[in-house]
Image: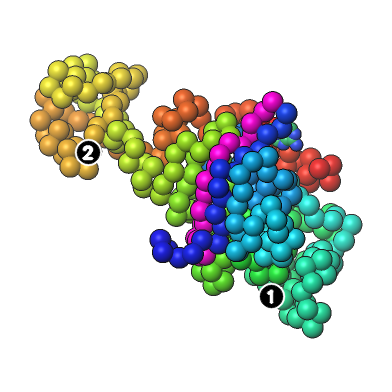
Amino acid sequence: MQNTQPVLQTFQLSKRFGELEAVQNVNLRLSPGEIVGLLGPNGAGKSTTIKMLSTLLRPSAGNAVLVGYDLIKDPFKIRQHIGIIFQDSTLDNRLTGRENLEFHCMIYKVPKQERPARIQQMLEMVDLTEAANRYVKTYSGGMKRRLEIARGLLHRPAILFLDEPTVGLDPQTRATIWEYVRRLVKEYGMGVLMTTHYMEEAENCRYIAIMDRGRLIAEGSPEQLKSMMEGDRIQLTTADNSLAASWLEQNRSLKVTVKQDGIEFVLPHGDTQLARLLTELPTEVQRLTVQQPTLEDVFIKLTGRQMRDSESGLIDRLRFSAQRKGRL
Ligand SMILES: Nc1ncnc2c1ncn2[C@@H]1O[C@H](COP(=O)(O)OP(=O)(O)OP(=O)(O)O)[C@@H](O)[C@H]1O
Ligand SMILES: [Mg+2]
């Protein structure tokens, strides 16, 4: 994908709200058929970036080119080529699922004769054919999200923006939604720019940009980002944990933490070094756990903070339950 013409490219994209620099000099690139993830904690500037790129907010500085159009000069042309699935539901609860889709076709000027077939195809894709004539207010959270995805894709956008597409959903529904997205990327060659703070979701991305306080602080493939970590996290329970700890510190210069039921340390080049180290350890190993670095570890290393603290989990749950009650 390296040589493909990007379907989206930003140039020092920035947004200021009064004193707050919500997005600062962001440079991103998205190719057709590629999923790029924007990761960051609450307030990082992810939604603001998506809103600018989907022409809902005007940048304070910088610019972007989407499907060959200039974001500042041609927002209306861009709008016809993008699909957006927002963090907060924007479905009309008083309409049926099908009516929501028909309304969308009208706004996006999908040719009249094509509408029924396209709507049917999308409903089938998200498994909502049977529920299509029910009012959306009777849908579960997962059904609403699936309908939103169907709606976002009806006009066959070249770029799909997903702002936390699966927030508040159970793991099974999340997995299903990801199957759809991956299939569509493959079938239609859409470019997807998504935000999430679920680490396992980020693994779906070919390329990840980590955002914190309005800035991109690291970028790369999940593997490249993980290789920034010093090594694998090893947990050992041995016959003599304090002997094991002092041997590792003295002979291997490792920083060892002694825990209640064992010891823990980070081992550089664990894939090649671990087996030898275990045979040389002067005490019997009873239990071994090897944890490869996660994107969460990378994030903590870069920012000193967790991607998702308990408070943000609570905010998501509140936001989601308010959404379901039709208050947002
Ligand atoms: N319309 C607005 N007016 C003033 N400040 C805003 C506005 N929209 C966003 N902000 C602020 O800009 C910052 C970035 O917000 P944004 O919604 O982009 O974050 P986010 O990364 O999407 O966070 P979350 O994970 O909570 O969705 C926050 O400090 C937020 O309070
Ligand atoms: Mg957001």
**Residue pushed farthest right?**
94
Q: Provide the residue span drawn in magenta.
A: 19-36
Query: Residue at the location (12% across, 22% down)?
Result: 251
Residue holding disc 2: 269
The vertical placement of 97 against 269, above or below, is below
Q: Amino acid at mark 1?
A: Gln
Q: Is residue 268 magenta?
A: no
The vertical placement of 189 against 149, above or below, is below
**Residue 48 image point, x, y percent:** 66, 41
**Residue 248 image point, x, y percent:** 18, 22
Which quarter shows the N terminus?
bottom left
Which numbered marker is on residue 207? Answer: none
Q: What SS does tag 1 mark?
A: helix
The vertical placement of 121 against 64, above or below, is below
Mark 1: C-beta under 8 Å from nearest atom of ligand 2: no
Which numbered marker is on residue 121? Answer: 1
Query: Residue at the location (64% across, 48% down)?
Result: 50
Mark 2: C-beta under 8 Å from nearest atom of ligand 1: no
Q: Amino acid at mark 2?
A: His
